[in-house]
Every structure is written in C-alpha cells, then in structure tokens.
Amino acid sequence: MSTQRTFPALTPSTRSYIPGAQPETTFTSQNGSTSFITFGNRKVDCRLKLGFRNLEDNYAMLILEHYRITQTDDYVVFDSNHGLGGMTNDLVSEVNLTNQGLKFRYSRPPEITSVFPGISNVECEFTGYLLSG
C-alpha cells in the first residue's frame, strides 16, 4: 500500500520541471508517411529536479532521512512550503494538479556535496508516474 511522504519544509535554490509527454508510438511507412498512435489521455514521466545550495548539514539530513523512509511504493508530495517554495501558486498547481494523477517518486538517491564544513549542496530528482490503486 503506497503512502504519501511530504517533502521536508525546505525551499530549493534551483528547480527544473519537465511536464512530461503523452505516450505514443511513431510508425513510418515505406513511402515515408508517418503515423502517430497515442496511448491514453494523460501525460507521463514528468521530471522535477530540486537543488539546494549552501544548506546546513542538519537540513541536508532532513532530505536524506526523507529518502530513507520513502519505500518503493510510496510517493512524494510537494507544496509551496515543502520543496516548491519560490514558485507562483499557478506553477505549484501545474506541478501538482495538472499532472492528472501522476505521483512523484525519487528517480535516484539525493546527491549531497560538501562545500564547507557543515555546509552542503543537495540535488534531488523525481519522476512522476501514473500509479494504479
């Protein structure tokens, strides 16, 4: 059973969002004409990257602990106070609502780079999946 795991109450220094694409297959015939077959009516595989610069190590640990408790069937929830700070409300809605049921999961473990004693940079990557149930 999947569980919502709210991202820690941190505001990223940088973020990158790719809204995903509708699944489709392209067929090219021998005469060169191209046909597209679309599967479903929802976009999939959206991407969200969050970068945290010059973060105190205790805050970097919050992200690492969040990653550790997030099980394989859990998904990550974001809002304007948890990971999406600095975005307008319209853009937060785009990330959370317009994805029509996509759920974010970590794409890979967070990357923590020490830049000074007690200070780190953290990079997190997430992928939006259409999960059943």
Image (cartoon, grey):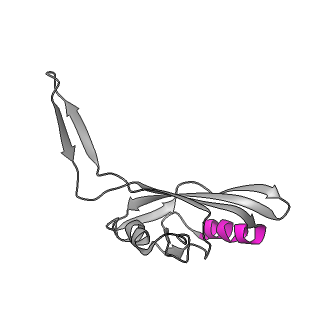
Judging depth in this view, the residue of 80 and 1 nearest the camera is 80
In the picture provided, is 3 more to the left or to the right than 22?
A: right
Judging depth in this view, the residue of 91 and 78 nearest the camera is 91
Q: Main secondary structure of the magenta part?
A: helix
Q: Residue at x 31, y 67 (%)?
A: 100
- The image shows a total of numbered marks equal to 0
Quarter of the image with the C terminus is: bottom left
Determine if residue 110 is in view: no
Quarter of the view holding residue 24: top left
Determine if residue 89 is in view: yes
Where is residue 81 drawn, in percent x and y?
55, 78
Where is residue 10 drawn, in percent x and y?
62, 73
Where is residue 104 drawn, in percent x and y?
46, 64
Where is residue 79 drawn, in percent x and y?
49, 75
> Which residue of the protein is positioned furthest toward the top in this rendering?
31
> Which residue of the protein is positioned furthest toward the right in this rendering?
117
Quarter of the image with the N terminus is: bottom left
**Image: magenta residue range:** 57-69
Indicate whether residue 59 is drawn in magenta: yes
**125 w.r.t. 30: above or below:** below
In the picture provided, is 46 more to the left or to the right than 13?
A: left
Q: Residue at x 27, y 59 (%)?
A: 42
Judging depth in this view, the residue of 14 and 108 nearest the camera is 14
Indicate whether residue 44 is drawn in magenta: no
Q: Residue at x 55, y 66 (%)?
A: 71
